Image (cartoon, rainbow, N blue to C red):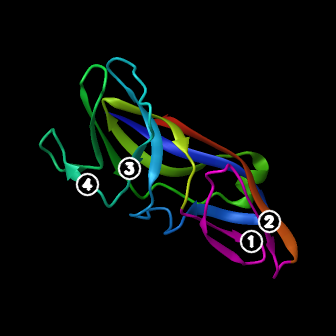
Amino acid sequence: MVKYMLVISAELENLTNLQPQGGRDDPTFSYFFKVKCGNCGEVSQKATCVTLNETLPSPLGKGTTNLVQKCKLCKREGTITMVPGSGSPLTQDMSETGKFSPLMLFDCRGYEPVDFVFGLGWKVESIEGTKYEDVDLSSGEFAEYDEKGECPVMISNLRSAFNVVK
């Protein structure tokens, strides 16, 4: 069992508090990433979708998990279980210093998450308080004009990583 923390970073222009639409532990937010088999090293061709509200009985017989998948190459089964409660929004201060913000913790057995895919369902707010919801980051950026604050707002240079947590 290895735990991986998904961390994100981005350049936020006149924005702060980038996070999933329903907050840090949004049960409906879809996390898309590829998985690497811990047995043979095969990386999935397509991104796998994992959400908190989709659970399956654990093949180990204890509790539930969010993903059960067999490796297409070696046929070994692996699981990924999400561990809520450890994420926080990406703030403008973190963005300015190039720091990463923790988003979600994954308990992985037989798989390693790789290549997180930014997509739909994000929210962010301007430093003037204007809220932007259902933000689509699949193109790698977001740009608008904040009428209230009379300034451009933008998200760019999206980055992510999965860090091993001891």
Element marked by disc 4: loop
Residue at the top extreme, as displayed: 40
Q: How far separated are the C-alphas under marks 4 and 1? A: 35 Å
Percent x, y for residue 18? 63, 61
Q: Earlier in the sequence, mark 3 or mark 2?
A: 3
Which residue is found at the position 21% from the left and 51% from the top? Answer: 56
Disc 1 residue type (three-letter): Ser
Left or right: where does residue 88 sit relative to residue 148? Answer: left
Q: Which residue is mark 1?
A: 126
Image marks 1 and 2: residues in contact by CB distance under 8 Å: yes
Percent x, y for residue 3? 39, 38
Q: Earlier in the sequence, mark 4 or mark 3?
A: 3
Q: Residues within 10 Å of mark 1 (few under 14, many from 20)?
A: many
Percent x, y for residue 25? 44, 62
Disc 4 residue type (three-letter): Thr
To which quarter of the image does residue 59 belong? top left
Tell me if residue 101 can be seen.
yes
Left or right: where does residue 74 sit relative to residue 104? Answer: left
Q: How far separated are the C-alphas under marks 1 and 2? A: 7 Å
Magenta segment range?
A: 121-149
To which quarter of the image does residue 129 belong? bottom right
Q: Which residue is mark 2?
A: 153
